[in-house]
Structures are given as C-alpha cells and as structure tokens.
Image (tube, grey):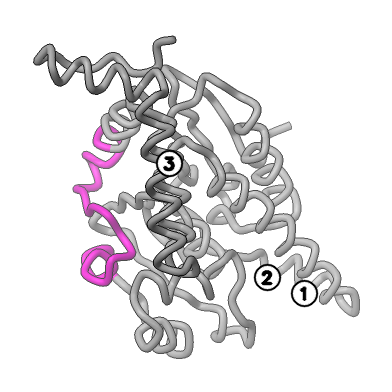
C-alpha cells in the first residue's frame, strides 16, 4: 500500500513528501495524519540538520480534500476540526525543530497547501508555481497557521486582500511579497533545493534553531525581553561546541567544521 507521506533521511537532510500526486496532494485524513506523524518523528532524530518539504508529482498541494468533506455529511464540522488540529500539530512540530525547513513548491499551493508551504522557514518555488489562499472561494476561513503567518510576511492590509479576494499569485509575485525566498527555473529547482539543504544541514544547527525561535517570538515579545533573550542566547551559543569551533575557524582562517563534539 502506498504511503500518503514519505520521509527519507540522506546526508543529514530529511526529505518530507506529500505523496498523493493523483489527487494533487489533496489533504485527506491519511495525508494529514501521516504528515503529523512524520513531522513529530523528526524531533527524536539527531541525524537531521535540514528538512526539504515538497509534494510528489505536478503540485505541492491543492489544499483540503473537498470530496472527503462533502462525504462527511452532518459530521463535517467534527471532521474538519480533526483535520485542522492534526495538521496544526505537524506544522508546530516543524516550527519547533532546530533544523531549518525548506518548502519546495511546484504547480499549485492552494488553501491548506499554501498554508503549509509558507509555514516553512524558507520557500523555493518553480517559475511556473502559483499560490492561492483560496479558502473563501468555498466559504471557509483559514487554517494551517495562515492567519498568523500571512500578515507577518505581507502585512495586515495585503493579507486581508489575499484572503478575501483569492488572487492567484505567480511565484514571481509571491517572491515580491516576501512569501517566496527564491524563484528558480523548473528544471533547476530540485538541484538548487538539494544544494541549499546540504549547506544548512552542515551548518550550526543550534544557532539555526535559536534564530528560528528568536524571530518567531519577536513580534509578540516586548523589546526589552527580546534584548535579554538575545543576550542569553548568544552567550549560550558562544560556549557551545559549534560556537567555539566557529570562532577558532575564523581565527585560523579556515572553514568551520560544525557538528563535531
């Protein structure tokens, strides 16, 4: 039986793939639960320094499985709540990893698919990829953290416009708005994503995780508290093996070897 989500680790990179290409990687219970389980399993591993998150086939994900929702009938509210909370657990697990998460987008990233894509730390998109918030097109509100992530990236006013009007964004336009980190030629996307993941996977994972946390909490932390958190964090990292190695490598005029005890 085909796995709804695949997870493979090679050379310190975890390849996390939504694997329902025949349905555009639509998010049904099997996909959502497998995504959550795979994401949560990464916290238990010490051999992962970066995560590449993508969708099999032509699309990243077209969003929620509307046939499943229709078939749920009078139980649809409970069904959708279960899907949303399960997906949110997976998103939170990825956000709390020290390892940077890179979403790699081909084709459509719509609705919950867009929410998943932009929740990553970095977003690489093919030139032909496109993004649509999509929820109000079917009378729904947002999930997947989009109501938190989107305004923090594009601003409240633009987030409201995108959510209400469901403008289809090209990857170039998404990059202009800050939703996409890099736009790449379709035939170069995989190689460029692998190269970036390898670079991050061999970097100082403790520093990567600290930066993720500092940035995530910066919008709600008082300025004085943020300064204190920065001071405590940089002090701790300066005494950690990677921090000591980074300083020594700089003084020795050589490349650092992070990840060594």
Magenta segment, which residues?
170-192
Q: Residue at left 23%, top 52%?
A: 182
Res 128 → quadrant: bottom left
Which of pointers 2 and 3 lies earlier in the amino acid sequence? 2
Which mark is nearer the camera, 1 or 3? 3
Name the residue carrying label 3. Answer: 233
Res 252 → quadrant: top left
Name the residue furthest right.
Answer: 74
Which of pointers 1 and 3 lies earlier in the amino acid sequence? 1
Residue 242's x, y, as percent? 36, 21
The reply to whether residue 104 is in sight is no
Name the residue carrying label 1. Answer: 70
Quadrant in which the C terminus appears: top left
With respect to residue 233, does 122 lie above or below?
Answer: below
Labels 1 and 2 touching (C-beta < 8 A): yes
Q: Residue at left 34%, top 75%?
A: 154
Quadrant in which the N terminus appears: top right
């Amino acid at each position: 039986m085909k796995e709804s989500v695949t997870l493979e680790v090679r050379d310190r990179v975890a390849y996390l793939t939504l694997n329902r290409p025949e349905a555009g990687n639509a998010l049904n219970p099997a996909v959502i639960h497998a995504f959550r389980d795979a994401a949560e399993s990464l916290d238990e591993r010490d051999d992962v320094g970066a995560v590449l998150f993508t969708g099999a086939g032509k699309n990243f994900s077209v969003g929620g499985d509307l046939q499943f929702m229709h078939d749920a009938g009078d139980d649809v509210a409970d069904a959708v709540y279960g899907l949303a909370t399960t997906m949110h657990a997976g998103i939170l697990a990825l956000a709390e990893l020290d390892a940077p998460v890179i979403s790699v987008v081909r084709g459509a990233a719509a609705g919950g698919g867009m929410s998943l894509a932009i929740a990553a730390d970095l977003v690489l998109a093919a030139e032909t990829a496109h993004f649509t918030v999509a929820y109000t097109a079917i009378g729904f509100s947002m999930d997947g953290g989009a109501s938190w992530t989107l305004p923090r990236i594009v601003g409240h006013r633009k987030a409201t416009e995108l959510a209400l009007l469901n403008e289809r964004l090209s990857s170039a336009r998404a990059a202009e708005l800050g939703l996409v980190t890099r736009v790449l030629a379709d035939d170069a996307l995989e190689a460029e994503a692998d190269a970036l993941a390898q670079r991050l996977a061999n970097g100082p994972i403790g520093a990567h995780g600290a930066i993720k946390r500092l940035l995530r909490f910066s919008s709600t932390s008082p300025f004085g508290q943020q300064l204190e958190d920065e001071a405590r964090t940089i002090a701790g990292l300066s005494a950690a093996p990677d921090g000591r190695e980074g300083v020594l490598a700089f003084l020795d005029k050589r490349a650092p070897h992070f990840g060594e005890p």
